[in-house]
Amino acid sequence: MSQEAARGVVIVGAGHAGGTAAALLRQYGYEGSISLVGEEPIAPYQRPPLSKAWLKGEADAASLMLKPDSFYAEAGVDLILGVRVTRIARAKRTVSLADGRTLAYETLILATGARARALAIPGADLEGVLTLRSAADAEVLKADLGPGRRLAVIGGGYIGLEVAASARALGAEAVVVEREPRILARVACEALSTFFTDYHRARGVAFEVAADVAAFEGEGRHVAAVRLGDGRLIACDVVLVGVGAPPNVELAAEAGLKCVGGIVVDEQARTADPAVFAIGDVTHRPLPLYGRMFRLESVANALEQARQAASAIVGRPAPPHEVTWNWSDQYDLKYQFAGLPFEVDDIVIRGDPATAKFAVFHLKGDVIQAVEAVNAGAEFMGGRQLIAGRRPISRARLADTAISMKEVAA
Amino acid sequence: MAKITYIEHNGAEHVIDVKNGLSVMEGAVKNNIPGIDADCGGACACATCHVYVDEAWRDKTGTPSAMEESMLDFAENVEANSRLSCQIRVSDKVDGLTVRMPESQH
């Protein structure tokens, strides 16, 4: 028997984007039914702390929850957890759940997120070869770290570096293996890569860059070493694979929605089907500031698109465009970045990396496209405003720390 | 436990009992009070949990860190009593605190 409630909003994916969309719909006065369907067994929570404060034991599980459990009943949100959505029938406006239920929708929001990419190499299925995406993943990883444990991180991106930093805080040893000649190659400029490499090294993290991983070697069923492409072995007790996160587009693609890397949406987070929105990591979205489409993976993007979709659904004016941003915490460093370095001609560094308080501005002509700030809140905030404003800027003033960022941005 | 009054920009008041140890921001977000966005979840990375602390409570809510101050400096309509509510810890000391919200966090 299929159970069809009154048609309202069905949200597929109970992560940061989906959970926020449900809360915003109610906050904006939406009165129809809302179903929020998630594959994980727990209510929406914040993922960023899983590699940072939570992993180090500085935040408890309750503090990760987006809303208290009581919120969903009080707000009239039907939270359906631990169930996969198996199919979307757009003609009938229904979704099928793995437990046999069918939900009818007036409006569908796809917030299916991304998943950790696995490595297709020998030994990838050994115990102790981990990825980090969910709270359950984080529990397993945390249990495997501690004084004297040897962690090998595959991939020198944010996740890998944050976990390496947290592992050091927990007393574990850490080595980071990166395929590219430098860490953060895909996401940060060379000055930042050098800075983070030095900062981690000074805190006991070892690096193998320009290094391929050929296999994981086990002792019995458990991983015991990483074999590099040149044959060398790195002994370890646990491996974290952090090599990117492909979007979960399968449901949308099977339903005939256009996917180019992610689900293609417009500035309201709407797909080509006016009854279907998509938000968060899974989308391929317009970036009006840069005049192009892109897939962003960040909380800021999830929230911005949740606001876009919820506003469109209740008929509220569209929220203002945001400058995309994100952050990373490693040791005592707060790394914040805004904008994207498209078509950049050169960079201006403000402050001295040796002091661990500086910012790198990426310029196209005299216009700032992006800023990367380390322990430099004013440069991050001022940079965001300058990126949004698209005004030409004086490089000399930007580089001169004797002139406050407030004055530079004025 | 502390009783905290959150006043939206439009004047709507919410009086909430917030557990010690949480931040003033968490007290609002976990009760779905509009006006405090807290995009970064309390990492002092985004300045979208800006509030104005009632004058009588400024001493008891402590002083902002250099990072908080530099972020606040660029928030909209910042005043001398502006704070990022993720950086104010709830304890018996702030029982009765009133915070007001700015027109917009974005």
Image: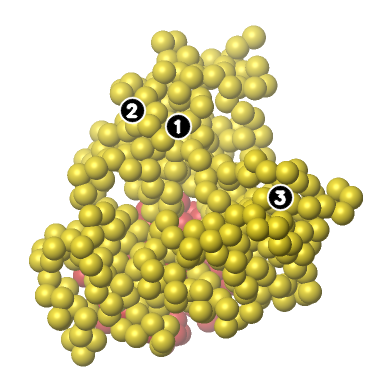
Chain colours: A yellow, B red
> Secondary structure beneath disc 1?
strand
State the residue at coordinates (28%, 58%). Answer: A341
User: Pointer 2: residues within 10 angstroms few (<14), some, or many (20+)?
Assistant: many
Q: Is residue B7 left or right of residue A184?
A: left
Along the viewing direction, whichever of A370 and B86 lies nearer the viewer:
A370
Residue where numbered disc 3 is placed: A215
Residue where numbered disc 1 is placed: A110
Q: Is residue A87 visible?
A: yes
- Label 2 marks which chain's residue? A
- Quadrant for the N terminus of chain A in the image: top right
Q: Are marks 1 and 3 in contact (CB under 8 Å)?
A: no
User: Pointer 3: residues within 10 angstroms few (<14), some, or many (20+)?
Assistant: some
Q: Amino acid at mark 2?
A: Thr
- Label 3 marks which chain's residue? A
Q: Are marks 2 and 1 in contact (CB under 8 Å)?
A: yes
Disc ID at residue A271: 2
User: Pointer 1: residues within 10 angstroms few (<14), some, or many (20+)?
Assistant: many
Q: Position of residue A8 (x, y in %)?
A: 43, 24
Q: Amino acid at mark 3?
A: Ala
State the residue at coordinates (62%, 74%). Answer: A205
Give the vertical position of A161 relative to A273 (above or below).
Answer: below
Q: Is residue A407 left or right of residue B36?
A: left
Quick one: label 1 or label 3, which is nearer the N terminus?
1
> From the viewer's perspective, is the residue at label 3 or at label 2 nearer?
3
Q: Position of residue A379 (x, y in %)?
A: 29, 75
Query: Image quarter for residue A397?
Result: bottom left
- Label 1 marks which chain's residue? A
Q: Are marks 3 and 2 in contact (CB under 8 Å)?
A: no
State the residue at coordinates (35%, 58%). Answer: A325
